[in-house]
Image (cartoon, coloured by chain):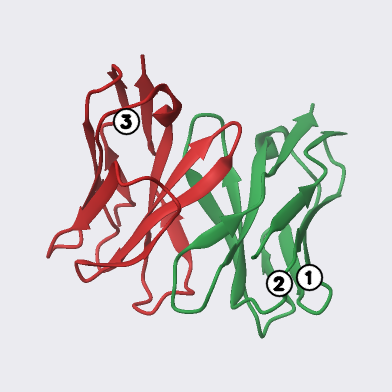
């Protein structure tokens, strides 16, 4: 059974550009959440989707957005990139529809902003 | 506001030693607690999930305990091996019905051969 798949694994952007990251959850999982990991702040919650609806959003500026498709795949977008957006972006999926279940993470997308 | 703390931040032990990693949380009204492992530059691997009604969970050489009333969880690793070297993170949901987790900063474990 394939795990959570994130693409791309690595990318380099310059300030002001935008980036789109993709996440395919484990087959049968309908809940997808995104996290940002930096050395200084650790892991911080970005957003959570279930059945194409955003259920929760973390404390990030509006430059960070996401969506979920009918096949449960999810994308997140960061516009007008800043140096501080350099981070490992992790996607997680869960089997339980109503949350509080076990989360399974992908390998992450490492974003470097120059 | 839920806060999760992990002490120590780093731990170095010789191979074969049994060890305990600690995790504490400020709001005891949790639905579950999950322990993860993260290797450098990699994603998180789920190790154990303890539901709020459980006291402990075991998987191989790993045993996690949960004491909601005191806001503590421990991860016990028996007979440590160099391959156990990684950062260990604990996390709790901020509320029921949500996958919004609050993470500790982790404990970086080094097991020396």
Looking at the image, which residue is at 44% across and 66% down? B99
* Label 3 crowd bin: few (<14), some (14–19), many (20+), radius 10 Å: some
Residue lying farthest front?
Answer: A62
Residue lying farthest left?
Answer: A70
User: In the displayed structure, does residue A24 sit left or right of residue A44?
Assistant: left
Looking at the image, which residue is at 56% across and 30% down? B40
User: In the displayed structure, does residue A18 sit left or right of residue B83?
Assistant: left
Up-down relation of residue A39 to residue A32 (above or below): above
The residue that mark 2 highlights is: B27
Residue B32, x across and y down, in percent: 60, 74
| Alpha carbons under labels 1 and 2: distance apart | 7 Å
The residue that mark 1 highlights is: B71
Up-down relation of residue B6 to residue A55 (above or below): above
Looking at the image, which residue is at 33% across and 51% down? A4
Do the residues marked 1 and 3 share a common chain?
no
The foreground one among B105 and A77 is: A77
Up-down relation of residue B104 to residue B48 (above or below): above
* Label 2 crowd bin: few (<14), some (14–19), many (20+), radius 10 Å: some
Q: Give the chain letter at badge 1.
A: B
| Alpha carbons under labels 1 and 3: distance apart | 36 Å
Asked where in the image residue B86 lies, by quadrant, the reply is top right
Residue A10, x across and y down, in percent: 32, 25
Q: Give the chain letter at badge 3.
A: A
């Amino acid at each position: 059974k394939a795990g959570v798949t994130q693409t791309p694994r690595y990318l380099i952007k310059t300030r002001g550009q935008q980036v789109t990251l993709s996440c395919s959850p484990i087959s049968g999982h309908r809940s997808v959440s995104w996290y940002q990991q930096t050395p200084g702040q650790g892991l911080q919650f970005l957003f959570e989707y279930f059945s194409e609806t955003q259920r929760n959003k973390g404390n990030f500026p509006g430059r960070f957005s996401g969506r979920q498709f009918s096949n449960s795949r999810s994308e997140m977008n960061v516009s007008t990139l800043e140096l501080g957006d350099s981070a490992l972006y992790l996607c997680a999926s869960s089997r339980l529809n109503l949350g509080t279940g076990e989360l399974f993470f992908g390998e992450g997308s490492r974003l470097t902003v120059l | 506001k839920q806060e999760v703390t992990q002490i120590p931040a780093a731990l170095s032990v010789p191979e074969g030693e049994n060890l305990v990693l600690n995790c504490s949380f400020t709001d005891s009204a949790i639905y579950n607690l999950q322990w993860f492992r993260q290797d450098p530059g990699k994603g998180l691997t789920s190790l154990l999930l303890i539901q709020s009604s459980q006291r402990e969970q075991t998987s191989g050489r790993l045993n996690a305990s949960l004491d909601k009333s005191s806001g503590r969880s421990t991860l016990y690793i028996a007979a440590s091996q160099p391959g156990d070297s990684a950062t260990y993170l604990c996390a709790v949901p901020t509320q029921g019905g949500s996958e919004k987790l609050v993470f500790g900063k982790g404990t970086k474990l080094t097991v020396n051969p």
